[in-house]
Amino acid sequence: MSKTFVTYFDEKTLFFLLKEGLSKGDKISLLINELVEEQYIEKNLQLLKELSIKPSLKRIDFQRIEQSSLITTIANVFEEAKGEVIVNLNADQQELLIALTINTILFMKKINRSYYYSCSKGEFVEVELPKIVATVDKSEKKILLLLKERKKTFRLLVEESKLSKSTISRIMKFLEKEGLAKTTVKRRELEAELTLAGELILKVS
């Protein structure tokens, strides 16, 4: 089975890949900080190319990560990952590390192994992350999908979902409690919108 490596792009990337070993058909998804200089990328890319001459990698994907869309961009990387998925939980930027960890937990069912670099041991160590099971039923997912389009009033949700007012009210109470959606009062009418957590749950539901 081919492997997809999801890893932040830094000097430890090569050690991570060497630990796991590369095979023909494997893919590397590199997460690159938007502030990283092109010269640094080119230098390390050359090392990766030299490393992959024999195994003939399927491809190396570069994914520049913008501060404004850290979690959703990384979620898309995991969503598209094929085969055996292996994650390197290292990043020199706290925000990116948090986003990477959140997605690793969220996509746990899809991930085979995850590692972090232990400074005390001077090597990569496999880490077992907690499994979080978040599920929504058919009706709840229907509402989330409607909210993904744009913010909507309760009246519009009833109209488009074909569900009763009481059912919409029950679903929205649950979604708000779980942090998957939120409501605000606009022009004396309740308006609902999808949260980042709601958007992520849709990706794995």
Image (tube, grey):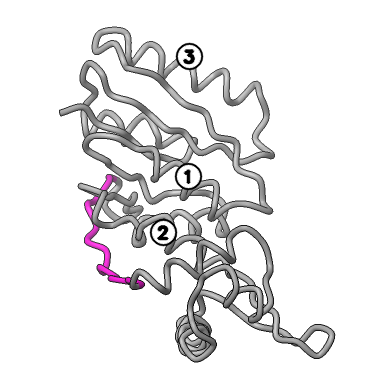
- Type of residue at label 3? Gln
Which mark's residue is nearer the viewer, 1 or 3? 1
Up the image or down, 100 lies above or below 47; here it is below
Up the image or down, 58 lies above or below 116; here it is above
Q: CA distance from mark 1 to mark 2?
A: 14 Å
Residue that numbered label 1 is attached to: 76
Left or right relative to 23: residue 11: right
Which mark's residue is nearer the viewer, 1 or 2? 1
Left or right relative to 120: residue 144: right
| Front in this rendered view, residue 81 or 11 | 81
- Locate residue 161, reporting x and y percent: 52, 70
Q: Which mark is residue 46?
A: 3
Q: Rate crowding at label 2 as few (under 14), some (14 to 19) or many (20 or more) other CA atoms within 10 Å.
A: many
The question of residue 129 being in magenta is answered with: yes
Residue at figure coordinates x 52%, y 28% from the top left:
62
Residue that numbered label 2 is attached to: 101
Residue at figure coordinates x 69%, y 39% from the top left:
35
- Locate residue 32, reporting x and y percent: 56, 37
- Type of residue at label 2? Thr
Q: Earlier in the sequence, mark 1 or mark 3?
A: 3
